[in-house]
Amino acid sequence: LASRDFHPDDTVIDIKGTKIGGGNLVVMGGPCAVESAEQIDEIAGLVKAAGGQVLRGGAFKPRTGPYSFQGIGVEGLIMMAEAGQKHGLLTITEVMTPEYVDICAEYADILQVGTRNMQNFDLLRKLGTCGKPVLLKRGFSATYDEFLNAAEYILAGGNPNVMLCERGIRTFETYTRNTLDLSAIPVLQQLSHLPVISDPSHGTGRRELVEPMSKASVAAGADGLIVEMHTDPDNSMTGDGVQSLFPDQFAALLKDLEQLAPLV
Ligand code: PEP
Ligand code: MN
């Protein structure tokens, strides 16, 4: 079902009139994690003003260590839904376990599967029947074939609205947090009809690389970007402040991107 052989036309996912895929460029922006109602409301206003279409923010955070901040949970979902509604943005949030799919689907427009859960097959199966579009992140050591097979689980469950997200893979390089695999963009588009989104924030782990890698992703044909932005990155509650753009950088990036591809 994920293969272009059986589905030659690009999949276009229409979410409340915003079309993702098929030559449109969508920009999803926001903090790594929802921290408070004030924080997500302020950032939502900035995403909207800059021309972004989707508000990102994690309420459930998959942290490498068990003692790190794990997200504020359902309260965060509600805060983000309110901010999205108020500012006219779609919302995307990560869901980590099958038990939480229904509640996340109730509050968010798009459900994100994180890199660490790309092969959580029970989660993928549950997302097949959740009724909401899914952004599936590539496992940081997954091949294209493994990635497309993970998408296949969701599609086979009856959900045709899947986006593939390249978010960097693990290589020998340590200067960057991950190595953003730009080749993934055209390769996945050749093999599959599903929209391909690039995440230059997790893909590099370094703020100063987000702008050039965003532009490179769009030049390579990405259907969209998911970018971390924070009003006070140095004090963000996850470690991802170092890769988060300041609001003015986010706005400048979107202005530049409009020269490359019209924002939907
Ligand atoms: C995130 O988007 O904040 C995140 C945890 O991403 P990834 O799963 O790609 O690490
Ligand atoms: Mn993050």
Image (cartoon, rainbow, N blue to C red):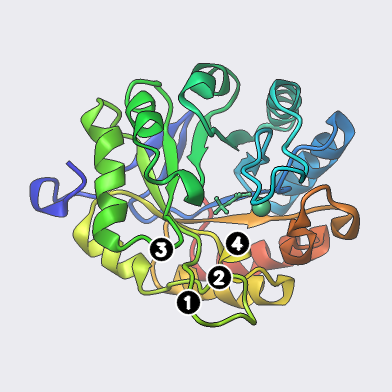
Answer with left or right where residue 153 lies relative to residue 29: left
Residue at the image point whose x is 67% and y is 67% from the top: 253
Foreground label between 3 and 2: 3
Work out how far the residue at label 1 is from the one at label 3, CA to CA, in angstroms. Answer: 9 Å
Q: Are marks 3 and 2 in contact (CB under 8 Å)?
A: no
From the image, tell me which residue sits under label 2: 178
User: In the rendered image, which residue does mark 4 sit on?
Assistant: 202
Numbered disc 2: secondary structure: loop
Question: How far across and how far down the image is residue 100, in percent?
Answer: 54, 22
For marks 4 and 2 on the same chain, the one whose residue lies earlier in the sequence: 2
Q: Are discs 1 and 3 less than 8 Å apart at CB?
A: no
Of the numbered discs 1 and 3, the one sitting upstream in the chain is: 3
Q: Quadrant of residue 205?
A: bottom right
Vertical order, 15 against 234 (above or below): above
Whether residue 14 is visible to the viewer of this picture, yes or no, is yes
Q: CA distance from mark 4 to mark 3?
A: 14 Å
Q: Which secondary structure, mark 3?
A: loop
Three-letter amino acid code of the residue under disc 1:
Thr
Mark 4 or mark 2: which is in front? 2
Going from N to C along the chain, the mark reached first, 4 or 3, is: 3
The residue wearing badge 3 is 141
Foreground: disc 1 or disc 4: 1
Quadrant of the snapshot with the N terminus: top left
Instruction: Determine whether 245 is above or below 180 in the image.
Output: above
**Cβ of disc 4 within 8 Å of ligand 1?**
yes
Specify the amino acid type for callout 2.
Answer: Asn
